[in-house]
Amino acid sequence: MENIAINIYYSNSLKINGDLEEILFGIEEEGLPWIVTESEEKDSKVLGNIASQSSKLGVGIGIGIDGVTLHHDKLEKYKPLFTFPLSSMKETFRMLGMNGARLIKGEPFVIPKGGK
Amino acid sequence: MENIAINIYYSNSLKINGDLEEILFGIEEEGLPWIVTESEEKDSKVLGNIASQSSKLGVGIGIGIDGVTLHHDKLEKYKPLFTFPLSSMKETFRMLGMNGARLIKGEPFVIPKGGK
Amino acid sequence: MKLIVGIDIGNATTESTLAQVDGEKVQVLSSGIVKTTGIKGTKENIKGVFKSLQKALENCGKTLEEVSLIRINEAAPVIGDVAMETITETIITESTMIGHNPSTPGGIGIGVGISLPIEDIKKDHVGVEVIALINKDVDFQVAARTINNLVKMGVNITGAIVQKDDAVLINNRLDRKIPIIDEVLHIEKVPVNMKTAIEVSEKGKVISMLSNPYGIATLFDLTPEETKMIMPLSRALIGNRSAVVIKTPKGDVKSKIIPAGELNITGESKKRSVRVDRGSKEIMSAIKACHPVNDIYGETGTNAGGMLEKVRVVMAQLTDQNVKNIKIQDLLAVDTFVPQKVVGGMAGEFAMENAIGVAAMVKADKLQMKMVASNLEEKLDIAVEVGGVEAEMAIIGSLTTPGTTKPLAILDMGAGSTDASIITKSGEISSCHLAGAGNMVTMLIDRELGLGDFDLAEDIKKYPLAKVESLFHIRHEDGSVQFFDTQLDPGIFARIVILKDGEMQPLEIDGNIEKIKNIRREAKKKVFVENGIRALVRISPTSNIRDIDYVVLVGGSALDFEIPQMITDSLAHYGIVAGRGNIRGVEGPRNAVATGLSLSYREG
Amino acid sequence: MKLIVGIDIGNATTESTLAQVDGEKVQVLSSGIVKTTGIKGTKENIKGVFKSLQKALENCGKTLEEVSLIRINEAAPVIGDVAMETITETIITESTMIGHNPSTPGGIGIGVGISLPIEDIKKDHVGVEVIALINKDVDFQVAARTINNLVKMGVNITGAIVQKDDAVLINNRLDRKIPIIDEVLHIEKVPVNMKTAIEVSEKGKVISMLSNPYGIATLFDLTPEETKMIMPLSRALIGNRSAVVIKTPKGDVKSKIIPAGELNITGESKKRSVRVDRGSKEIMSAIKACHPVNDIYGETGTNAGGMLEKVRVVMAQLTDQNVKNIKIQDLLAVDTFVPQKVVGGMAGEFAMENAIGVAAMVKADKLQMKMVASNLEEKLDIAVEVGGVEAEMAIIGSLTTPGTTKPLAILDMGAGSTDASIITKSGEISSCHLAGAGNMVTMLIDRELGLGDFDLAEDIKKYPLAKVESLFHIRHEDGSVQFFDTQLDPGIFARIVILKDGEMQPLEIDGNIEKIKNIRREAKKKVFVENGIRALVRISPTSNIRDIDYVVLVGGSALDFEIPQMITDSLAHYGIVAGRGNIRGVEGPRNAVATGLSLSYREG
Ligand SMILES: Nc1ncnc2c1ncn2[C@@H]1O[C@H](COP(=O)(O)OP(=O)(O)O)[C@@H](O)[C@H]1O
Ligand SMILES: Nc1ncnc2c1ncn2[C@@H]1O[C@H](COP(=O)(O)OP(=O)(O)O)[C@@H](O)[C@H]1O
Ligand SMILES: [Mg+2]
Ligand SMILES: [Mg+2]
């Protein structure tokens, strides 16, 4: 059985380091585990959708060449909860991770600036 | 987009009437909607698993030739929450439906006798 | 057969009752209600009167031309205002404690050591117990690596204080786990090289060592005298999940009592002075002793003085009188707690401070209803008369509530004042006006929740709460669940919302529904249950509340979804039948005065 | 150099302190704690003493042979017991109301009509307003079809009362929606052919018409006299989401006051009688006025009499004395509400009834500690002496708490009694014993929650709560969340659980965490804050609580995760430093007496 975690799917044309790693740190500080999976897919929304569907907690993060998404398995594929460009600030990535965890814990989001 | 509902998958060698219909009534009395889908599959656990995976609420009921199951999309395929034989009492089927709704509403289950 | 209309111009609403008169028989046809335009008793009211009348006419298909007489109320010339002052203050001199509750601290347990910035911890500290201070410029990975190295070297790092939200991240990377408190905004204020203790408890539990004076004494080897000094500190930490205490030579935490001053009450025959910081009970019993009250003053130069002066100035402006002529003739004081930022705190700590809320009632000049009447007559070209005193009309109207009979008392619970009247078996009517009503409840909610937003507090008062538990469902305050087809706004996720007219208005308040619900209900009780009993004692012919049989609740605050039931319940103890009025069996608690105005009409 | 051990045989625990004596110097080496075996002061204690001593020896690697002296306590000869009686009772004569809250009623709104079994509604009822009674033999589809047909025929079906849980199912199938109340167990008791009103409110709201006496008067056209009669009925319905009221000629709901009788208090110089139903305040002030109390009796043939008689019998058995010699020398009374099944209810309704809880303290004969000592000596072949009075030893032990000094008071909060002692600057010790401690708190929790399970109540007292929110996570009472890797037992899903030693013990209680938490905290306050102040006033040399500087909390109930902080907080108002003891800086609030016994040893 797969583990309880927030699943993160990322495009294999990217590397999860530098600022992107902040996403993982955001989840970790909130006390939840994550699992990172590489994928052929490039679209962040699709990645987020797959990630959330495969997460036992129903929450996934997609990191595509077009940006990052926070997704929930009960949302429509192309309507993730949050979307940010790859050019976002370090703090924004941290908050994205935190919000993924908060979605599960039932705590209010830190609303990052510059998202939509 | 599919609707918010408890999904019910049943084997096409069965009909949802008589006592089995009580499952639907149990859900309805608790105030939640359901969607019934016919399937080639015969195993109640597999049916319940598919049903819960496809439900926006993450809750599904499988009605197979071996019995009925109440399933949740975060549970392992072959470990549904409740399982009952087709020979169960009318009241048991009603309670199964009620419990599906209560799982979503966050209300304690009515624990039916004779299940496992 | 003719058509008449009774119109009640209230502070908040203008209500009308259209009736058909046939000799002795007066039959009500319809009613109307709109917001009052302008201040009660001024020309500006006329617009509202016209609209209200229009509504009543529409509701039964009549026209203005058919109306032959308008009867308006002789308004009670009272207005009220509310104010609040805190009477305690928590001050930290030199930093000695950090009492905040970061949502994700690290580690569990107690750590004691000398506070040192992480970059200053060196070989010299081998064998020494040290609490590391980690400011926001230090990356958490660097911080964790540094601590691990120092520990390997032999420095005994027993805890850490972190500026950013990094506690769990650091702790996860430590070879030996330590308690860590993060999100300490003003870490630069943390004194360096001082003995420091950190306590973090398990999820769901509270600290037990730092909230106990002898616990602090144990950790810091305090003398009995020093233990006495840190008492307010340990008390301030009760209920926290995490805390830091730092021993500095002159550091201190004081719970100061603000000199709130005295209230001087001048009654017709008695005078009393009472210190505001003695609490509402003493204030209210002094006011009772001085009844009937001529005026109430606050000691000048004190909070009490300022508070009442403010009320007086507002009242003078509203009624266009000289401040000197404004006499406060009743006052309702209520004890409360309000959240206040701790002076000198390092992490934006709040403390609950004692406060006193007051509502004051001022008798104004007789309102110019005659003037309003003649103005109205001119405008509409219909005969207008001042039909009767508000209190009497309210009683006549309330007696149309099914199940009532004389003797009957009514409580008219408005925004500024609670007015009570009584009619005896033989028909004599007397009445009184008390300070404190709907606005007082709203102020208490506003201040106790630290909102600073009267309108929001008004909504919290009027509407039930719910918690948004997922992106698709909410849980009502009674525990029932409601689902939505479409995703809810992420901005309200996990928030407490007010359910107002089918909309969800989120509150920016942490904490749970029960806490807010409790504040809401207590505020209502403190004002209306207290005032209900006060009013009934005052108007009871025998001064004994038990001699009243029936009480009808009317006015805007009787529309509340909780207040009438609280009064029903509390007056039941005295054997009184009390409940929300139902004017003419259909209007609920509205329209009592307007109904009284039309029903009391006699031809000729 | 020799090894001695102080052993404290308590009602609940037997604690020992092993010390090494070198001339004047007594140095504690280790301690032990086990459950007391048998009743305190009997031979059965010896097994526990032996085990406790064994533990202490193990903890420092010594053997029994090295011990040269055992010092046991001279126990305070007091024991306590608790009891509770309700003083109000709600009785429904002839069925007139159904006040229950089915979780899934149908429809929304108010319906009024004549109650008739669905099978008896006929053509005759065309034009009549009818409430249909649907018993469990009628299938919901049949019921819905029947109602639809009747309505088409012209019968005005305005509501329904259903025995099974079918309300939503029926309502969903109706052409015209009506309010429906279901799960009415005893539907056969609903009177037929009577005027009936049903109210169901929206999710998250409460009924407003049937909980208002004038609302019922409006629906039933009641006279003022009749309205007075139905007052307790509407009051009983306050706060419900749904309700039914039925008007029967002689039907009635009474909130009866049970004649609870009087307590007769005989003090050394004064006597007082006080009616139990006047509440705890009056009882406690009568007891205070009679201090010191010689005995307390309850009026025979009343609840009060029975309650104290019960205590007396239990105490007589425990101490092996004649009932007549048992004198109650202190009593703590507490007001509470307990859920009681409504007599005559039709749906298993509960009402919250007023009740009084009491704890009584009885002075027994001097306990036979001498006998225990000589028995022990024989068994172990080690010298055993009765080392000192419990209260004095407790003070000597408590003074080892860091930050304390003489004058010092201690509160020993056990199971049956709260014992207080004080030592003055010059070393004089005095003490007192008050009724009411841990068992009283447990009883209040047990009864207020209607558990009928003392052990479960004891757990609720001691451990924090959480709610199982999904199959994979719980939410702690402070709002924090905890996840689990494996699915939780469905039996605890959506339940409130106690977190005891890493296990989740589900409660069979509906309602929310806050309600239970509130009851738990209030019970602790009512007993220990009240008793703490009572005890300190009594032992203060000046009778003024403000003249005490330091208070140390010891005993089993000082281990509680909330009680010490409540006392710290409440005594801070008097400028007192109070907190959980920390005996020798390491033991917490345990081991005070045993420590005192070994530290007070003097050679020769
Ligand atoms: N639905 C409601 N629930 C609770 N309070 C209400 C409601 N509607 C109005 N109020 C309160 O009633 C008060 C106004 O009452 P009203 O009788 O109209 O005032 P006044 O007599 O001063 O003109 C305000 O405090 C307002 O908050
Ligand atoms: N961890 C705990 N939390 C709260 N109460 C406790 C705890 N442990 C014991 N108690 C309470 O302490 C009481 C027993 O105290 P103790 O001092 O051992 O009794 P006694 O002095 O009567 O022998 C009981 O009421 C028990 O419920
Ligand atoms: Mg953190
Ligand atoms: Mg139902």
Image: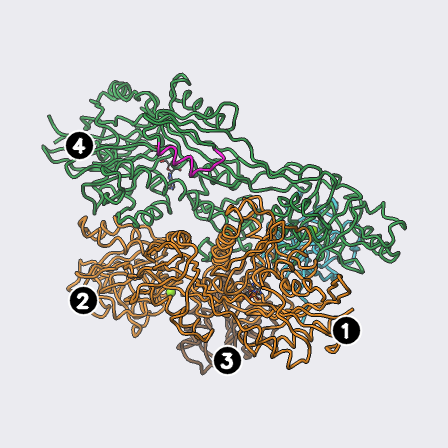
Chain colours: A cyan, B brown, C green, D orange
In 3D space, how far apart are the residues under numbered discs 2 and 4 (Cα atoms)? 47 Å
Mark 4 Cβ and ligand 1 under 8 Å apart: no
Q: Residue at x 75, y 63 (%)?
A: D27
Image position, residue D263 (x, y; %): 34, 60
From the viewer's perspective, is D80 left or right of C104?
Answer: left
The answer to whether marks 4 and 3 mark residues whose Cβ atoms lie closer than 8 Å is no
| Residue bearing the label numbered 2 | D122
Front tag of 2 and 4? 4
Give residue B67's mark: 3
Q: Residues within 10 Å of mark 2 (few under 14, many from 20)?
A: few
Amino acid type of disc 1?
A: Gly
Front tag of 1 and 3? 1
Mark 4 element type: loop
Front tag of 4 and 3? 4
Amino acid type of disc 3?
A: Gly
Image position, residue D76 (x, y; %): 53, 65
Mark 3 element type: strand
Mark 1 element type: loop
In 3D space, how far apart are the residues under numbered discs 1 and 3 (Cα atoms)? 63 Å
The answer to whether marks 2 and 3 mark residues whose Cβ atoms lie closer than 8 Å is no
Mark 2 element type: loop
Q: Nearer the viewer, residue C561 or D586?
A: D586
